Amino acid sequence: MPWRWVAVLVLLAGAIGGATGAAVTLLRGDDDDGPVRGTLVHLGSPDYLASFTPQPFCVELHHFCIAHPETGHPVALYTYDPHPLFRGMGCEVRWQADAGFQNGPVTIHGLFTDPCGGFEYDSSGRRVFGPSPRDLDTFPVEVTDAGTIVDTRRLICGQQRLEGTYACERAPLGD
């Protein structure tokens, strides 16, 4: 192969690699320094969403479930595992209405379960079993008369449960 063709192929490969890298950079970034990722998700009226309690209302397309904890204000739980290893593998927690656990004299029904790490979280996203580094991460929720809006552009880290530093990042799956 003549050296000119090798040079053309190297330049072409570099251009394709650069374009691919730029596209990946645009998809990533939910921090303040990077490009915006996510969207505003408009849901139904607060009364409609409250009709799902005590079961969470899950929106699989956007990877969150709306839960109604004791505070009464809806919480949008990010359904990707908070452990960095499992999040990087694309592991998502799933609502299991028939799962439960004993909390002293009270039996709690319904859990978010993680098929990869075996972690379990209650309906408000608090870790109840397993060495998960923190509670489930959340997205901001705004409730108005017109409806409920979930802002999947901003990730709020769950409460830390283990000592150490654990990354609080979006899953790398283009959600």
Image (cartoon, grey):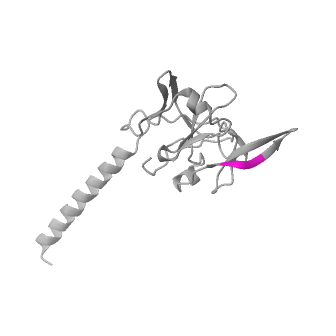
Specify whether residue 59 is in view: yes
Quadrant holding the N terminus: bottom left
Report the residue at 56% width, 47% height from top: 80
What span is colored magenta in the figure?
Answer: 96-100
Residue 38 in the figure: left or right of residue 88: left
Q: How many marks?
A: 0
Q: Position of residue 102 (x, y in %)?
A: 83, 44
Report the residue at 69% width, 54% height from top: 118
User: Is residue 76 highlighted in magenta?
Assistant: no
Residue 23 in the figure: left or right of residue 154: left
List the single residue furthest toward the top.
145
Residue 169 in the figure: left or right of residue 23: right
In this rendering, the answer to whether 6 lies above or below 175 is below
Q: Quadrant of residue 56?
A: top right
| Front residue (pair 133, 103) | 103
| Front residue (pair 174, 82) | 174
Q: Position of residue 111 (x, y in %)?
A: 70, 45
Q: Position of residue 4 (x, y in %)?
A: 11, 70
| Front residue (pair 48, 121) | 48
Q: Position of residue 83 (x, y in %)?
A: 60, 48
Q: Quadrant of residue 53?
A: top right
Q: Quadrant of residue 135?
A: top right
Report the residue at 70% width, 28% height from top: 70
List the single residue furthest toward the bottom.
1
Principal secondary structure, stretch drawn in magenta: strand
| Front residue (pair 99, 21) | 99
Specify whether residue 131 is in view: no
